Image: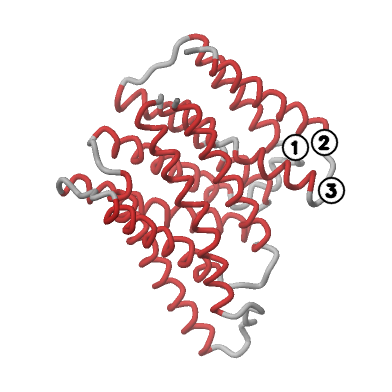
């Protein structure tokens, strides 16, 4: 059953990635957009806590939730920083190292290990994703921003591990997500207000062409896919191997590629087709490893 939840997380995070890709082409305030993403997550999670009578059982639950919020804020900030100063394909490749970091740390922290067949399936998925991400030209001469891509990967891995830790503590999902989205929305709101004040005091800084209301509403819509993905991935972590869940959820890039092919009419390169095939074969291998 964990693989179903992991695939649902892949789908929702893929849709989120499509919406992020679309908004990246617009002149908007990124912090305000992400404030909307996290704010609707906070409201949705709090509603879940009330309706399902969930609760926080101690400071450990609250701390993990807050750490998730801080990790999400940092990962997004590092990723945006990397894209702003480095080659997009390089940052994408480095941030794609998340499943490998998760596999290593899950073994060190909880002695989680894989069977030979599971390791084979993980390897196929990871290689497939890497082939896709490496389909653009990368050389030793264009490594600017690499450190931000690595930091993003580490913090995304940090979030996956914290998601697993919340299940080991027996924490209620919506209680954990309320803490996470609450702190995350607060941090992005502060970042937005600081940037807004700076822009208003400097006339030479170009203003976004989207209104603040439109940007925030768009963030709310994206946030619905984000919170659905988080519920799915934590549900998968609760019953599945941490590294395998992380690897499958990392396949959300396939959803974005399919969108590019079907909607944007972009053609696949030979490397991307090989990567897509390998990733799907990896999922099939994992399905039959249980």
> Crowdedness of circle 1 by 10 Å Cα count: few (<14), some, many (20+)?
some
Of 169 and 106, nearer the camera is: 169
- For image coordinates 33% across by 61% down, the residue present is 182
Residue 214 located left or right of residue 112: right
**Relative height, residue 69 to residue 193 (above, below):** above
* Residue at image mark 3: 265
Q: Could you tell me residue 216's position as x and y percent?
A: 52, 72
Dot 2 alpha-carbon crowd within 10 angstroms: few under 14, some 14 to 19, many 20 or more:
few
In this view, 58 is above or below 270: below
Residue most extreme to the left: 58
Name the residue at 36% across, 23% down.
Answer: 107
Query: How far is mark 3 from mark 2, CA to CA?
Result: 13 Å
Tags 1 and 3 touching, CB below 8 Å:
no
Mark 1 vs mark 2: give the one in front. Answer: 2
Q: In the image shown, does 161 or 79 lie closer to the viewer?
A: 161
Q: Toward which corner of the image does residue 110 lie, by quadrant?
A: top left
- Eye-nearest disc, 1 or 3: 3
Q: What residue sits right under mark 1 in the picture?
A: 135
For disc 3, the neighbor class at 10 Å (few under 14, some 14 to 19, many from 20) is few
Q: SS for tag 3?
A: loop
Label 1 residue SS: loop
Kindly indicate whether the residue at mark 2 contacts the one at mark 1 (C-beta within 8 angstroms).
yes
Inter-mark Cα distance, 1 to 3: 18 Å
Say which residue appears at 61% left-offset and 19% top-offset: 284
* Tag 2 secondary structure: loop
Q: Could you tell which of marks 1 and 3 lies nearer the N-terminus?
A: 1
**Where does the image place residue 123, in percent across and percent down from the top left?**
57, 20
Identify the residue under disc 2.
269
On-image quarter of the N terminus: top left
Q: Residue at x 63, y 77 (%)?
A: 210
On screen, residue 183 versus residue 85, left or right, reads left
């Amino acid at each position: 059953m964990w693989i179903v939840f992991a695939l649902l997380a892949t789908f929702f995070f893929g849709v989120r990635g499509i919406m992020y890709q679309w908004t990246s082409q617009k002149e908007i305030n990124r912090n305000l957009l992400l404030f909307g993403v996290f704010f609707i997550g906070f409201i949705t999670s709090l509603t879940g806590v009330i309706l399902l009578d969930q609760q926080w059982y101690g400071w450990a639950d609250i701390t993990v939730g807050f750490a998730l919020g801080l990790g999400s804020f940092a990962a997004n900030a590092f990723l945006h920083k990397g894209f702003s100063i480095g080659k997009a394909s390089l940052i994408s490749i480095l941030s794609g190292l998340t499943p490998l970091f998760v596999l290593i740390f899950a073994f060190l922290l909880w002695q989680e290990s894989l069977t030979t067949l599971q390791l084979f399936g993980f390897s196929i998925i990871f290689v497939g994703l890497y082939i896709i991400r490496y389909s653009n030209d990368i050389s030793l001469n264009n490594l600017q921003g690499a450190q931000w891509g690595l930091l993003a990967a580490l913090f995304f891995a940090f979030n996956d591990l914290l998601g697993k830790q919340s299940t080991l503590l027996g924490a209620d999902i919506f209680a954990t997500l309320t803490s996470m989205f609450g702190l995350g929305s607060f941090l992005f709101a502060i970042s937005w207000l600081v940037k807004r004040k700076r822009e208003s005091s400097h006339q030479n800084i170009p203003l976004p062409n989207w209104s603040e209301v439109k940007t925030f509403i768009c963030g709310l819509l994206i946030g619905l896919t984000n919170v659905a993905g988080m519920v799915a991935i934590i549900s998968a972590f609760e019953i599945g191997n941490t590294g395998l869940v992380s690897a499958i959820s990392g396949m959300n890039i396939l959803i974005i590629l399919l969108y590019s092919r079907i909607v944007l009419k972009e053609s696949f390169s030979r490397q991307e087709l090989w990567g897509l095939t390998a990733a799907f074969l990896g999922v099939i291998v994992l399905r039959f490893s249980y």
